[in-house]
Image (cartoon, grey):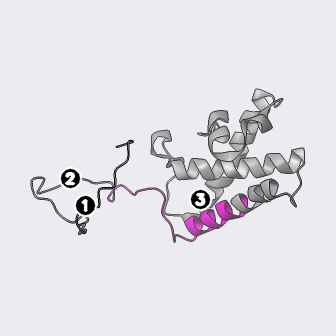
């Protein structure tokens, strides 16, 4: 099995890149595979999600959760100080990721669109429907140089 998450994803969403220094590429891939397998175990429990997921249909949220799971597992093996605020954050993120995945398994959250939900054919493309309406006071003159 090849995981849809990479070392780049782990550095982006999981843990500081320096924490990956010295880890063999094969071991890193094994860790990615194990973390993704854990995420998939929650998806299998949901029963409304067909596996395996096509790589192009995997939501970034699930990849991020897998990176967080992997980070926690790595830090447990490498050692860390759960009393430090930085390391405690790793634990909280891991617990939050598992809580999210629990909700996926309980069908309270559906991170993947089913085939019928993905149908975006608009029968009236020339008519704007729904959306937000913003009502505001007069312009206050606030501007930013970024716009």
Residue that carries the numbered disc 1 in the rendered image:
139
Determine the secondary structure under disc 2: loop
Residue that carries the numbered disc 3 in the rendered image:
44
Q: CA distance from mark 1 to mark 3?
A: 52 Å
Q: Are marks 2 and 1 in contact (CB under 8 Å)?
A: no
Location of residue 144 in the rendering, given as x and y in whole percent from the top left corner: 37, 47
Left/right of residue 80 with respect to residue 52 in the rendered view? right
Residue 121 disc label = 2
Q: 63 or 47: which is nearer to us? A: 63
Q: Nearer the viewer, mark 2 or mark 1?
A: 1
Location of residue 111 in the rendering, given as x and y in whole percent from the top left corner: 49, 58
The C terminus sits in image quarter: top left
Q: Earlier in the sequence, mark 2 or mark 1?
A: 2
* 35 over 94 or under it: above or below: above
Tell me which residue sits at (74%, 47%) in the image.
71
Left/right of residue 97 with respect to residue 19 in the rendered view? left
Tell me which residue sits at (59%, 39%) in the image.
4
Q: State which region is magenta.
A: 94-116
């Amino acid at each position: 099995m090849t995981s849809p998450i990479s070392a780049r994803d782990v550095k982006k969403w999981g843990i500081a890149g320096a924490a990956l220094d010295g880890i063999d590429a094969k071991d890193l891939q094994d860790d990615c595979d194990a973390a993704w397998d854990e995420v998939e175990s929650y998806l299998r429990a949901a029963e409304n999600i067909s596996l395996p997921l096509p790589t192009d249909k995997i939501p970034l949220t699930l990849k991020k959760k897998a990176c967080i799971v992997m980070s926690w597992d790595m830090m447990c093996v490498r050692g860390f100080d759960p009393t430090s605020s930085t390391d405690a954050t790793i634990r909280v993120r891991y617990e939050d990721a598992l809580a999210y995945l629990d909700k996926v398994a309980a069908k309270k959250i559906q991170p993947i669109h089913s085939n019928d939900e993905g149908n975006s054919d608009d029968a009236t493309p020339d008519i704007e429907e729904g959306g937000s309406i913003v009502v505001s006071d007069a312009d206050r003159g606030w501007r930013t140089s970024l716009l």
